[in-house]
Amino acid sequence: MKNLQRIKFLIVDDLDANLLALEGLLQRDGLELLKARSGSEALELLLIHEVALALIDVRMPEMNGFELAEIMRGHSRTRHVPIIFLTAGVVDQKKRIQGYETGAVDFLPKPIDPMSLRNKAAVFFDLARQRAELLESEARLLHSNELLEASNAELARTIGGLDRANREKDEFLAMLAHELRNPLAPVRNATEILQLCGTESPQGSGALKLIRHQVDNMSHLINDLLDVSRITQGKIQLKSQDVELAPMMKNAAALIQSACRAAKQELVINLPQYPTFLDADATRIEQCLGNLLSNASKYGGEGCRIEFTADV
């Protein structure tokens, strides 16, 4: 509010002494007084400045106060400027009506009563200040709205970009899983053929087991990729049913037995003492347990002891 422009009043009188006297009475902080010695000078100032109040002497040569007011009312820029007429002596009813018809808000007789002048001027000064503050607030609000709209537009673009990136990521994961799964099928078929035909040496049997193990690991990785894609798309479905915990623990442990043997790790399985049933998706529970055990084996280090315990 401190940066508001000064309020402007216009004083019109053909006598310099009257202009100086009025200026002395009205002068205050935040107010700029424009002085004109004739109606034509006043019109020139009104074309340049926006004023909150015009104090006009009625009796002036060439163009009197009423004539100046008529011209002001005929122009869109000045028709709403409030006017106080300064009169010498008593103004008859006819003149008073003429003044109000031209837009006067009041008449002040000369000699001017300082207190009356200041009080009336203060009303219009305060009104103009409030209007200026309101306009400034509206301008700030408009600017804030423009910034908010720009920010919302940028946010929408960012969200749109993230959505596109997310869709592309899901599409890539699905494509990757598909492309990785394709070569696994013939490898798995080949291991089954080898198993049916038999192996001629322990080394061949070990190699076959290793191939099958790696194929299983790759299948799990591919399924994990597909699960990530399904989760991000909200498409993963859980099939809950009553399932026993112990068999799921055994199945999960079986998946890392070979890895534990290779790393000389001891895997200890402590099953629940009593049959324990869960309302859960058996496949997903086994997957979670298998991931936990796989991480334990992977990061436990060679020769570590892994305890897999469930208790109720």
Image: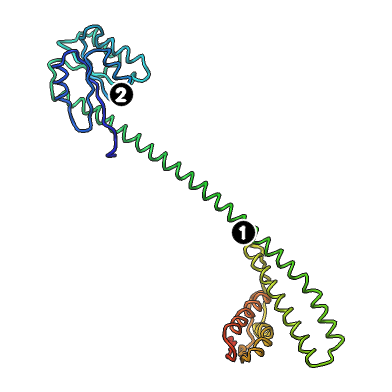
What kind of residue is marked 1? Answer: Asn
Provide residue 97's location: percent of width, then percent of height: 26, 11
Q: State which quadrant residue 83 falls in.
A: top left
Left or right of 249 in this view: 212: right
Provide residue 57's location: percent of width, then percent of height: 20, 14
Q: Nearer the viewer, residue 294 or 84?
A: 294
What kind of residue is marked 2? Answer: His
Return the residue at label 1. Answer: 166
Residue sitting at x 65%, y 77% = 287
Return the residue at label 2. Answer: 49
Above-or-below relation of 233 to 273: above
Residues at marks 1 and 2, CA–CA distance in whole angstroms: 59 Å
Which type of secondary structure does the marked residue at label 1 adopt? helix
Q: Nearer the viewer, residue 96 or 178?
A: 178
Residue sitting at x 31%, y 35% = 133
How many circles with numbers are drawn on the protein?
2
Q: State which quadrant residue 24 falls in.
A: top left
Q: Nearer the viewer, residue 73 or 219?
A: 219
Provide residue 135's location: percent of width, then percent of height: 35, 34
